[in-house]
Amino acid sequence: MIRVDERLLESLAKDKDFNAQACFNCGTCSALCPMGLGLLPRELFRYVLLGARDRLRELSDVIFSCLLCRLCEANCPRGVRITHNIRTLRSYLVKDEYRIL
Amino acid sequence: MNTASFKEDYKKDILALLAQNLGFRGSVLPLPSRYFTSWAKGLGLRRGGEVVLYTGHMYQLVPVIRLMEEQAKELAPEKRARLARLARWINPVVNVSAFSRFMVSAAARSRYERCLQNIVSLLRLTGLEPGYLYGVEKYAGALAFDLGLDGPFGRHAARVARRLRDKGVKEIITVDPHTTEVFKNVYPKVVPGFDIRVRSYLEVLAEANIEVRLPWEEEFVFHDSCVYARYLGLIDEPRRLLEAAGVKVLEPDQSRELTHCCGGPVESLFPERAEEVARARMEQLISLGRRVITACPICWLNLERVRDPRVEVFDISEILAAAFLGKI
């Protein structure tokens, strides 16, 4: 079961460059990722859009294992700012979950 | 303690350690300032000025990180996690990172220090005489920003920017992609009014048309840094310089804006994964030749640690210095 918290997206959307909603789930990013299929930006972005906070917490290793290398972005057909979005998820976890202020 | 929870704690402890170091000591890996400035001894670099060379401490940190990696590798993940927990509590009082400097030999440091010295000599060939901030120069904070440590990073960036302003700096010349990116594209967003011009030494050299003394006339494989290629668009400059130096540049399958990461960015949290990525990239590079050039100290460090003894990895400054300064 997924518990939904609508404040998650509200808090992330304060950052106007956060554009997970542009993703149309094609999977090009995951296919190119040097970290392999352990890292699925489109999956993360779906959970964000749903407001599935717990899932983000569970997937924190994935969020922190992104290289921020932007190979995915260079090929994204929707212009999703993937690395920026992932970094925004990190700062959310750091601040709201780990309480490192 | 189950695996998932100790891994989760390890990550939090490392993030907290990095945040503490940046907050209390102004660097993610704080060492005494003479450790960072000793490379400049005898070079006659002016103290401060409007145009300064900014090392960002990256080359100086390479041998320390390398040593820490080797030591961490010896430890089982559980033990590593316990040490990180202990360090997190001791670190606010005792600078735990400072111990590592006793273990880095002068020989291990000399190659990295020479890179910085060569960069100064190369810049001087263009007629530029940069200043240097010595102990006033601080780590720029790239790793903290990348890891989402926004609070500690923002406060640190404000302090660094204030120092630069107080010293009257108008332009900084950087030597690595991470420092370049964070000053050029992140500081202006987090520090109101930050308007210092930022240029990589590779841009400065590429614009200057310096004359070659000892052309290489040999082949090398070039590895693009992700940050130079995809964040900063600095793709042609290193190639122009290498070609002017007489190097025949071999391009791997993934090069230029499609370059493959060296794995370095996840080193602090997932060292095993970083190594896998480095190995995959190394395979691509050595399918073309056994001599590889990097332009980023972090790429250099990561490729170096998975290097077969028959393969050589060079920093671009070493190759340029040999050709333009005529010294090997």
Image (cartoon, helix red, strand yellow):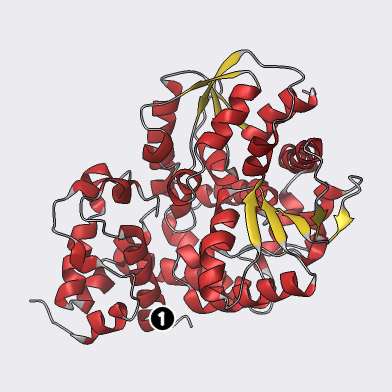
Q: Is mark 1 on a helix, strand or loop?
A: helix
* Picture residue at 73% right of the left edge, 50% below the top: B103
Q: Mark 1 points at which residue?
A: A95
* Picture residue at 74% right of the left edge, 17% below the top: B214
Q: In this view, does B44 lie to the left or right of B11?
A: right
The amino acid type, in three-letter code, at marker 1 is Lys
- Residue B170, percent from left and from top: 73, 63
Residue nearest the observer in this picture, B129 or B92: B129
Residue B86 in view of the camera: no
- Residue A5, percent from left and from top: 18, 85
Q: In this view, does B87 lie to the left or right of A10?
A: right
Does residue A51 sit above or below B291 in this rendering?
A: below
Q: Quadrant of the N terminus of chain B?
A: bottom left
Does residue B180 sit above or below B43 in this rendering?
A: below
Does residue B91 sit above or below A76 in this rendering?
A: below
Label 1 resides on the chain identified as A
The quarter of the picture where residue A83 lies is bottom left
- Residue B152, percent from left and from top: 55, 77
Does residue A74 sit above or below B15 in this rendering?
A: above
Q: In which quarter of the image is the C terminus of chain B?
A: top right
* Picture residue at 67% right of the left edge, 44% below the top: B201
Q: How many numbered dots are placed on residues in this image? A: 1
Mark 1 Cα-neighbour bin, 10 Å: few <14, some 14–19, many ≥20: some
